[in-house]
Image (spheres, rainbow, N blue to C red):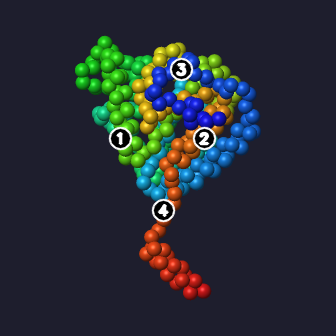
Amino acid sequence: MNFEKNFRVDGKEKIKLRNLRTAPDEAVDKDKIKEEIEKDVEKLKENQEMLYAQDKRGVLILFQAMDAAGKDSMIEHIMSGVNPQGVSVASFKTPTSLELDHDYLWRIHALAPRRGDIKIFNRSHYEDVLITYVHPEILANEHLPGIDSVEDIKKSLYTRRYKHIRNFEEYLADEGIVILKFFLHLSKDEQRNRFIRRIEIPEKNWKFSEADVKERAYWDKYQEAYERAINATATKTNPWYVIPADDKWYSRLIVSEIINKRIDKMKLSYPKVDESRRQELQNILKRLEDEE
């Protein structure tokens, strides 16, 4: 199956999240999937080494999802074999007072990947058009000009921010950053099951927060926020991928294959040395051999 094509949203047509599946069409072979992921991880390791050596382009991988969709374990599994010198993860929490004194993309740009690196965003700049869409009172406390209360917040604010984000991502792409945007599409029933497991299994208790259940009450509003954001910011250059997330191993396979497929399109290779440098290396080799 061509996962990159099948789960890609590039703005040609508007999507409805309720019409997109959250689970595989048929039962999956977990052992076979694990074998395929191992191959993908090995391939990603080689791709990352070439990316680092070439030092001309970078990769930004971002994950957005409802609580319990598996972002953390996704990152852990698909990046398990990559050299830590060339990959890092940034998680975006509630903005600090310093961050609130800057534009909302300031903290994002500061953590964008360097050339040669892979950067993973666990949540991202999309939080500023997602959680604020569900809880507009957040914006009323961010010292924004012209906004002193919730009543001052209009839908046009989000339209502007979608435009900001498209332009920001286009700018990064122009500068050599390949952006992969993944929405882990979890069903409400599966989220409930995972919350229950987090309570029933002692080793998972630390993952559970009452705030997660409170946010679950806004499920429909979050789905609307995600749908609007994805439709408004999916482009040919910077598409979204809506990944069925009810089966964690299946979602990991899809993501790992899409990452490699997109990186393959970058036509990476190890830098080639010119004749002068090659001769220099031969002279160094001769001196080292003469030491014997």
Q: Which residue is mark 3?
A: 17
Image position, residue 262 (x, y; %): 53, 43
Residue at x-position 63% and y-position 18%: 189
Task: Say which element carries label 1.
Answer: helix
Rendered image: mark on residue 97: none
Q: Which residue is mark 1?
A: 171
Disc 1 or 2, which lies upstream in sequence? 1
Q: Which residue is mark 2?
A: 257
Q: Nearer the viewer, residue 96 or 192?
A: 192
**Is residue 98 positioned above or below 154 on the image?**
below
Q: Residue flagged by tag 3: what amino acid is it?
A: Leu
Disc 3 or 1, which lies upstream in sequence? 3
Q: Residue flagged by tag 1: what amino acid is it?
A: Tyr
Task: Say which element carries label 2.
Answer: helix
* Quadrant of the image containing the C terminus: bottom right
Q: Would you say 92 lies left or right of 42 here?
A: left
Image position, residue 270 (x, y; %): 51, 60
Q: Is residue 103 visible?
A: yes
Q: Residue flagged by tag 2: what amino acid is it?
A: Glu
Task: Say which element carries label 3.
Answer: helix
Q: Are marks 2 and 4 in contact (CB under 8 Å)?
A: no
Disc 4 or 1, which lies upstream in sequence? 1
Q: Would you say 26 lies left or right of 117 here?
A: right
Disc 3 or 2, which lies upstream in sequence? 3
Q: CA distance from mark 1 to mark 2?
A: 26 Å
